[in-house]
Amino acid sequence: MIHLIPIGEDVRLETLDELAVGLAREFRDSCHVREDRIDAAFAFDPVRKQYHATSILRHLTGLSPQVRILGVTSVDLCVPIFTFVFGEAQLAGRCGVVSFYRLREEFYGLPSDRGLLRRRLLKEAVHELGHTFGLKHCTDWQCPMAASHTIDRLDVKGDRLCAACRRTAAAAAKL
Ligand SMILES: [Zn+2]
Ligand SMILES: [Zn+2]
């Protein structure tokens, strides 16, 4: 069971519903959209004016034992060693978080593109959830598990796991 949970006020439940369909297909698991919205104020860093992804993961871990949880947020995420991250997850753990702050075309000064945003969000969500299934970064550049720290690299990836990653994720899901 995968739970999707909105973090912040401007994450629409319809966005999560769409994402849930893609994730349920990819991980062959049921995907439930939660309505208990999280306020990420506790993770805000007033100096960086960003939100600490690792603090959010720690919070998610305490929410529900037994289920995999992916937080979806519109706030800008960071970790100490990077100026920003699209998302973060616990390797072979239960929780991940993704942000669409930098997945929107508007962030790059371009006109809004909802279809593109939806595709980017799905790839990033598959990537972070993949880490919770124990997947590491993949050398296949089309696989969503390939490392991508820029939007260009994210855009060349597909949203379906490569055969090797799919086998690893399936084996982890059975444990
Ligand atoms: Zn990664
Ligand atoms: Zn792969």
Image (cartoon, helix red, strand yellow):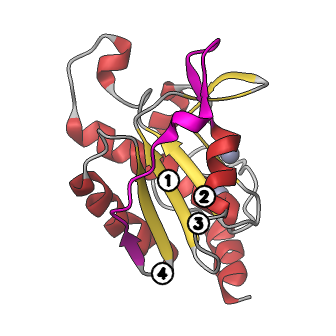
Image position, residue 105 (x, y; %): 31, 23
- Which residue appears at 58% of the width and 66% of the height? 63
Quick one: label 1, few (<14), some, or many (20+) residues within 10 Å? many
Residue 70 can be seen, yes or no: yes
Identify the mark nearer the N-term, 1 or 3.
3
Residue 60 tag number: 2
User: What is the three-letter code of the residue carrying label 2?
Assistant: Leu
Residue 56 placement: quadrant: top right
Front tag of 1 and 3? 3
Name the residue nearer the viewer: 105 or 52: 52
User: What is the three-letter code of the residue carrying label 1?
Assistant: Gly
User: What is the three-letter code of the residue carrying label 3?
Assistant: Leu
Front tag of 4 and 3? 3
Tell me how far mark 4 sits from mark 3, CA to CA. Answer: 20 Å
| Callout 2–callout 3 Cβ contact below 8 Å | yes
User: What is the three-letter code of the residue carrying label 4?
Assistant: Asp
Question: Secondary structure beneath disc 1?
Answer: strand
Identify the mark nearer the N-term, 1 or 2.
2
Q: Is residue 45 magenta?
A: yes
Question: Secondary structure beneath disc 3?
Answer: loop
Tell me how far mark 1 sits from mark 3, CA to CA. Answer: 11 Å
Identify the mark nearer the N-term, 4 or 2.
4
Residue under label 1: 71
| Callout 1–callout 2 Cβ contact below 8 Å | yes
Residue under label 3: 63
Front tag of 4 and 2? 2
Tell me how far mark 2 sits from mark 3, CA to CA. Answer: 5 Å
Question: Secondary structure beneath disc 2?
Answer: helix
Image position, residue 99 (x, y; %): 47, 38
Residue under label 4: 29
